Image (spheres, grey):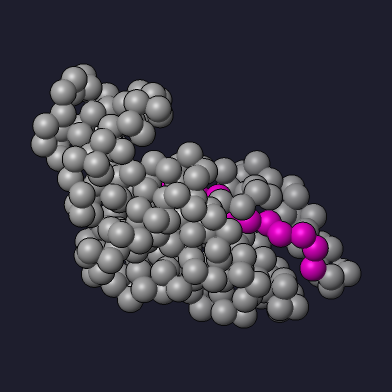
Amino acid sequence: MPPTEAVADAPVETTEAVLEAQRPVRAPVEAVLTPVTREDFARAGEAAYAQGHMSVALSAFEAAVAAFPGDPDAENNLGQLLSRLGRGAEAVAHLERAAAIVPDQWTYRFNLARAKGIAGDWEGAVADYRVAATMFPDDHVTLYNLGRALQKAGDHAGSIEPLERAVTLSPDEPSLLLTLATSYERLSRLPDAVQAYRTFLDRQPRAADAPAIRARIARLEHVGQPEGEVAATLSPRG
């Protein structure tokens, strides 16, 4: 089973965010000076990443791919780091190789979908999140990302089902409701949007943006017109 922990970072933001699947980052350790095994390269890269040395981590993961061609973990590690650096198109190439080598590995498929989103290929991201969701159908993080990708691809109607399931599966993460409310608004399902916002406020009445959400509810109830997007932001899983 993949880890499914995701912690609300900022309950409401107007910027787009996508959850990130990642292998657990170990506590900083001494970098391996002369990597020999796959594990050596992974330790060196993860240690450098944990300490914020991105160029060193990138070199370690690139060296692993060169030293062990065809190794899916090496391709996945490099692809994930490239995604975190915003180099989505480059990440896709490596993650596609990892997913092709082990097509039934959820982690590789999820990371590939995320990289496609970073590269702006939201239809491709939707397709890979759908595959990932078939592997772990009750994983709220996968379902959230599928719904978010569908929103970005312009399919708000299609986003409802995975987002509603994500909310049901993870009631302790009320920020998911904000993304769901966005799709309700875009579909002119304003009573549903108001209910989603109210449920969020019931669960997080002291959220930083609670006043803005209350004002939004008032506009929807009295004017009946949807406005701009309110997106939930969840921290990377790890």
Q: Nearer the viewer, residue 203 or 219?
A: 219
| Vertical side of 94 occupied by 193: above or below | below
Is residue 139 something that shows in the picture?
yes
Which quadrant of the figure contains the N terminus?
Answer: bottom left
In this orientation, which residue lies closer to the viewer: 207 or 47? 47
Question: In x, y percent, where is residue 97?
Answer: 30, 59
Q: Is residue 2 left or right of residue 127?
A: left
Residue at the (20%, 54%) spot, across then down: 70
Point out the image quarter for the C terminus: top left
User: Could you tell whether 158 is left or right of 143 in the image?
Assistant: right
Residue 202 falls in image quadrant: bottom right
The main secondary structure of the magenta stretch is loop
In percent of width and height, residue 168 lies at 44, 70
83 lies left or right of 195 = left
In reply to whether residue 165 is colored magenta, the answer given is no
87 or 237, nearer to the observer? 87
Quarter of the image where one finds residue 187 = bottom right
Magenta stretch: give its range. Answer: 226-237
- Residue at 62 percent across and 44 percent down: it is 206
Horizontal and vertical percent position of residue 197: 65, 62
Q: What residue is drawn where x is 57% and y is 43%?
A: 10
Estimate the x, y position of residue 229 in percent, counting from the top left: 71, 59
Q: Is residue 234 magenta?
A: yes
Q: Is residue 8 visible?
A: no
Judge whether 153 appears above or below 54 on screen: below
